[in-house]
Image (spheres, grey):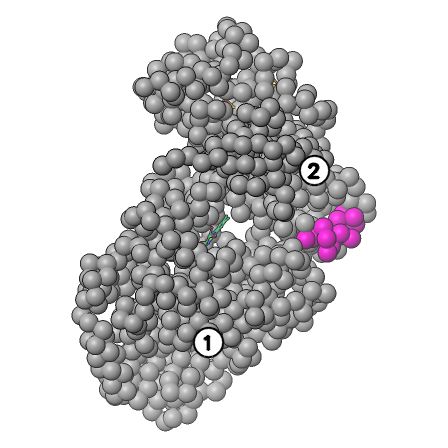
């Protein structure tokens, strides 16, 4: 089966991409940046953070660019007042959901959430903030899981399952109570499946999983996507 | 067994039933059993023996007739006499007077005739009339003749054509045209294909699907058979919540009977058509009823929704084309095949054909399960069928569409019930919950209550629903405890709109409806709460009052 080419417009620019490409990929390959948090190239699409919402001309609905495939003749709008407002709202909700005090966070200056908040100009939160007290797991020799900073993007779950292939990480409970767990809710030190590969720490966009006493700038921010892709492509 | 044999069974059964002069149908549905229906059944069996009329009377257990609030309900035929609140003690008198002397016991009869007058029973055609545990009862009512007709005289395309022409739309909530969904699945070339009947019914206070399964399980099975034939599926699952033991038991029995008569299996009615059916149990999360979450659950994974596309029609169970359909939708199918799509399209309204089952609850005189033609007005449902407000209290609002429906004011009572009209005013059809609210309820408190439900039920996958609803809930807590600010109104509006537009699945997309509609139609009450710290219904500020009392 040959893969066809799809022509569409993104922010009024005509682009042509292979069939099956997501709007996000199509935009990126044409130099248009759409903000994301849960998405990571090389991992399966999740569609959870809803930051990548775009408008499609002719539809009253919004679409998550990371999981919406392009269609012939689509006219995609990635920037509008409404979208900007909604993206700010998403960031505010995430920030107010758990405990985020950047000044005392290991991820300070290396955090995707913090960067997005800056880029989008989120200077206050509309709603009261939650100060959760969720368990921190620091039992592993060098990996730490601080659930109070987790934004439930599941990048760590997916990299562990899809790239490392061990599925050590998973979620328990639902809604606001959802939490990342290790094996069947074990301490990390007792995990029988974890290979200590550090991939989860590499892909975590915030300060929720990190390698102890290694500067986060070093763990992350080194082309995580390329790293994941290279592992994915390796046979 | 062949089609002719089916006909013979039907004739034989009709003769068999005619041999009885009376038929005493005791509702033994989940609604009436807690009121003692099984004891009433036993009492009837004993009483007919005692009076020596057991040869003339067929005492049968049946499904719900809808008047569950005054159960146990008993119907005596001929004449369709409906007795309400029957107790074992009253049974002797009923048998003596009604059966032996021919004098129906007037003061025990159900007197809310208006309850039935504006109803139209297509889906619940057999409810209360047949014994759901006997396949022969269903066959005698013409059951399985529709699948027989399809197999003998119709092509799959022909079946889809009839369903499309009927104008039937999915009864699970969203109202997607059923014929269109079928042709999407039929058109795919991947095999095998699957069918999933959705009997999750996670909305609190909604019980129409459970009732249907308990009263007429074979209607669901026959609907699935026809759908399977039309789209080319060989395997089906009924996804039912584990908290429905009676419905599960009834369906299990029905499936076994249908298998025994080669109505399910490798060679349906000896035509070579193959369809197998199994039950799958849900653990009872609201979100598990969402179609992609069901797929995950049936596959044995965490019931979390996933983005669509790919739609289940193309990539469903194990990546194969899958037709997901609500059970009420499916139970309409045999009726459509028997009478033709054209006939069906004339019931209801032009854009919205057929009927809809509703669980009617709240502060009205005749709560219960109803089935009404589409296009009936809310006023007719509340006043004519529902018998008006309890204790003649003033009407305040009606919540249409379950916990994520809309709260509509008196001014909208003349709205016809159909998908599009409801959506326009901020409500939804949902799975058919109607709650009537009188002036003793606070609308702010009501919206808070339903938001709390959705917060608990959010799966946690996406930010708007997971984090956004929590913030709405907290704002409500402030407003109802006296620490609200006027800015909160705008913030609720904004957040509600965002959650509705940005959430991944239908749960988040509809969860703000109670908030948005109360803000739209009952904004005064919000302002009163915030500015005057006053709650008309006296529901809020409990803590505040308590503090004052304590201080005094
Ligand atoms: C949160 C949520 C819960 C749902 N629960 C049910 C349910 O309990 N039963 C049902 O039939 N459909 C339910 N639905 C709708 C289904 O996703 C799906 O649209 C429906 O089963 C399709 O069948 P239909 O076209 O016959 O309506 C739910 C949807 C959402 C978003
Ligand atoms: S995780 Fe990011 S946003 Fe949260 S406290 Fe740390 S640096 Fe700040
Ligand atoms: S630990 Fe990090 S990567 Fe994993 S879900 Fe939380 S924020 Fe995402
Ligand atoms: S809208 Fe709510 S229930 Fe649906 S996927 Fe998002 S978090 Fe889960
Ligand atoms: S990047 Fe698309 S939803 Fe998160």
**Residue lying at 48% horizontally and 9% vertically, measured from the top left:** A212
In this rendering, the answer to whether A93 lies above or below B473 is above
Reading the image, the residue beneath label 2 is A82
Residue B423 appears left or right of A215? right
In the image, residue B549 sits, relative to residue A212, either above or below, namely below
Is ligand 5 within 8 Å of the beta carbon of the residue shown at mark 2? no
Which residue is at a point 45% across and 58% down the rendered structure image?
B180
Q: Is mark 1 within 8 Å of ligand 1?
A: no
Q: Position of residue A52 (x, y in %)?
A: 58, 32
Residue B515, position as x, y percentages in the image: 66, 48
Residue B53 or B262: which is nearer the viewer? B262
Q: Chain of mark 1?
A: B
Q: Nearer the viewer, residue B350 or A49?
A: B350
Residue B67 seen: no
Foreground residue among B28 and A12: A12
Task: Classify B394 as above or below A174.
Answer: below
Q: Residue at x 26, y 61 (%)?
A: B255
Q: SS class of the residue under badge 1? A: helix
- The residues bearing labels 2 and 1 have C-alpha atoms spaced at a distance of 46 Å
Q: Same chain for marks 2 and 1?
A: no
Q: Which residue is mark 1?
A: B343
The magenta region covers B517-529
Instruction: Tell me if residue A142 can be seen.
Output: yes
Residue at the location (64% across, 51% down)? B514
Residue B526 on the magenta segment: yes
Membership of A74 in magenta stretch: no
Question: x%, y% of residue B457?
Answer: 51, 43
Q: Is residue B40 left or right of residue B432?
A: left
């Amino acid at each position: 089966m040959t893969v066809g080419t799809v022509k569409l417009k993104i922010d009024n620019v005509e682009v042509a991409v292979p069939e099956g490409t997501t709007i996000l990929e199509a935009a990126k390959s044409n130099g248009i940046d759409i903000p994301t948090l849960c998405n990571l190239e090389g991992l399966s699409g999740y569609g959870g953070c809803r930051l990548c919402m775009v408008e499609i001309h002719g539809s009253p609905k919004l679409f998550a660019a990371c999981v919406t495939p392009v269609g012939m003749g689509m006219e995609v709008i990635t920037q509008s007042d409404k979208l900007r407002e909604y993206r700010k709202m998403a960031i505010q909700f995430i920030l107010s959901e758990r405990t985020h005090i950047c000044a005392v966070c290991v991820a300070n200056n290396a955090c995707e959430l913090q960067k997005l908040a800056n880029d989008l100009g989120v200077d206050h939160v509309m709603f009261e903030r939650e100060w959760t007290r969720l368990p921190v797991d620091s039992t592993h020799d060098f990996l730490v899981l601080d659930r109070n900073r987790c934004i439930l993007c599941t990048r760590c779950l997916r990299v562990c399952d899809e790239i490392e292939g061990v599925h050590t990480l998973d979620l328990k409970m639902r809604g606001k109570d959802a939490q990342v767990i290790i094996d069947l809710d074990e301490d990390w030190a007792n995990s029988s499946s974890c290979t200590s590969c550090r991939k989860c720490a590499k892909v975590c966009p915030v300060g929720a999983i990190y390698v102890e006493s290694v500067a986060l700038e070093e763990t992350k921010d080194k082309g995580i996507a390329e790293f994941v892709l290279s592992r994915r492509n390796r046979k | 067994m062949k089609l002719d044999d089916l006909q013979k069974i039907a004739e034989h059964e009709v003769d068999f039933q005619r041999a009885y002069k009376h038929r005493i149908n005791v509702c033994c549905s989940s609604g009436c059993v807690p009121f003692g229906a099984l004891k009433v059944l036993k009492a009837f069996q004993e009483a007919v023996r005692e009076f020596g009329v057991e040869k003339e009377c067929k005492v049968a257990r049946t499904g719900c007739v809808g008047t569950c609030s005054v159960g146990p309900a008993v119907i005596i035929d001929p004449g369709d006499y409906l007795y309400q609140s029957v107790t074992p003690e009253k049974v002797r008198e009923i048998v003596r007077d009604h059966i032996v002397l021919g004098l129906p016991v007037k003061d025990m009869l159900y007197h809310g005739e208006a309850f039935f007058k504006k109803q139209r029973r297509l889906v619940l055609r057999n409810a209360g009339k047949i014994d759901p545990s006997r396949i022969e009862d269903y066959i005698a009512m013409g059951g399985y003749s529709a699948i027989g007709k399809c197999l003998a005289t119709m092509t799959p395309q022909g079946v889809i054509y009839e369903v499309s022409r009927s104008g039937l739309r999915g009864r699970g909530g969203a109202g997607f045209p059923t014929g269109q969904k079928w042709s999407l699945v039929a058109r795919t070339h991947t095999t095998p294909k699957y069918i999933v009947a959705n009997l999750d019914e996670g909305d609190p206070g909604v019980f129409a699907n459970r009732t249907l399964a308990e009263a007429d399980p074979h209607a669901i099975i026959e609907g699935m058979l026809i759908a399977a034939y039309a789209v080319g599926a060989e395997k089906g699952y009924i996804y039912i919540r584990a908290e429905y033991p009676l419905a599960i038991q009834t369906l299990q029995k029905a499936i076994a009977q249908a298998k025994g008569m080669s109505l399910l299996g490798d060679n349906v009615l000896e035509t070579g058509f193959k369809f197998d059916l199994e039950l799958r149990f849900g653990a009872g999360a609201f979100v598990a009823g969402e179609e992609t979450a069901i797929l995950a659950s049936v596959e044995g994974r965490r019931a979390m929704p996933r983005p669509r596309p790919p739609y289940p029609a193309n990539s469903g169970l194990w990546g194969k084309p899958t037709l997901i359909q609500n059970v009420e939708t499916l139970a309409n199918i045999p009726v459509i095949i028997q009478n033709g799509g054209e006939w069906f399209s004339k019931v209801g309204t032009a854009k919205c054909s057929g009927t809809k089952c509703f669980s009617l609850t709240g502060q009205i005189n005749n709560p219960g399960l109803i089935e009404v033609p589409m296009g009936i007005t809310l006023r007719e449902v509340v006043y004519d069928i529902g018998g008006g407000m309890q204790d003649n209290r003033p009407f305040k609002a009606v919540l249409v569409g379950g916990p994520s429906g809309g709260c509509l004011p008196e001014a909208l009572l003349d709205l016809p019930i159909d998908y599009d009209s409801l959506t326009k005013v901020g409500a939804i059809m949902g799975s058919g919950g109607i709650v009537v609210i009188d002036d003793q309820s606070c609308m702010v408190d009501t919206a808070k209550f339903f938001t709390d439900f959705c917060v608990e039920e959010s799966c946690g996958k996406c930010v708007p629903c997971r984090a956004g609803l929590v913030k709405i809930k907290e704002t409500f807590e402030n407003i109802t405890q006296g620490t609200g600010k006027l800015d909160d109104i705008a913030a609720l509006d904004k957040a509600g709109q965002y959650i509705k537009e940005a959430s991944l699945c239908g749960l988040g997309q509809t969860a703000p409806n109670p908030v948005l509609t109360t803000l739209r139609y009952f904004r005064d009450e919000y302002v009163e709460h915030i500015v005057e710290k006053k709650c008309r219904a006296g529901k809020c500020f409990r803590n505040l009052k308590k503090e004052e009392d304590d201080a005094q």
